[in-house]
Amino acid sequence: MTLQNFSWVLPGKLAGSDIPGHHSADHIRTDLEYLAENGIRYLVSLEKPAGEIQQICSELNMTWKYFPIPDFSLPPDITAFSKMVTEIIEKLQNGLPVCVHCHAGVGRTGLVLSCVIGKYFLLDSNKALATVRRSRAAIDTAEQRNFVRYFLEEYEYRI
């Protein structure tokens, strides 16, 4: 079984997904192969999958980045989060397709995708979130929406 919640937000460039191995840890390799077959070269995990994900990603010519954000929560360090968003944008600018995932691929994934889209295209939070929601469900909580607004409309202008 392949990933159930994979979709492109920017076709061929930026995608979101549920966690590889969501339905069974036995499917991690199959799910990662699915991502690789769809062109993903940089995988950002907001929740750590079971198994040897780094090794499997390497075998599939994907780079794996782990940036933990607790479920239904916010990034614990906004400075580190901003650096991670910038790193994703640099990958996109260098032609490396990126996929971001949390557990279900909705809340935390939507938060990151909205911040990346907003910063990349200089959009406010409403437009960034609407862009993500055109292709997938995004954001679980009011706190996550408020974080996207703060990040795009206040924090990024201070640094």
Image (cartoon, rainbow, N blue to C red):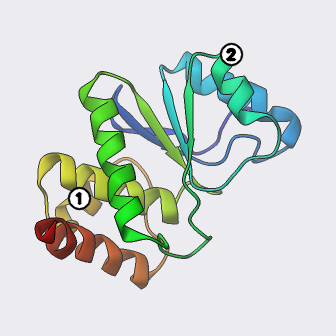
Amino acid carrying label 2: it is Glu
User: Quarter of the image containing the C terminus?
Assistant: bottom left
Please tell me in which quadrant of the rendered image residue 102 appears.
bottom right
On screen, residue 64 above or below 44: above
Mark 2 or mark 1, whichever is nearer to me: 2
Query: Residue 94 versus residue 158: which sits nearer the camera?
Result: 158
Judging by the rendered image, the residue that carries numbered circle 1 is 128
Seen in the picture, residue 128 relative to 51 is either above or below; the reply is below
Q: Where residue 150 sits: x, y (%)? A: 25, 77
Q: Residues within 10 Å of mark 1 (few under 14, many from 20)?
A: many
> What amino acid does circle 1 point to?
Ala
In the rendered image, which residue does mark 2 sit on? 59
The first of marks 2 and 1 along the sequence is: 2
Name the secondary structure under disc 1. Answer: helix
User: Residue 158, relative to residue 115: is it above or below?
Assistant: below
Residue 4, image x and y in percent?
64, 42
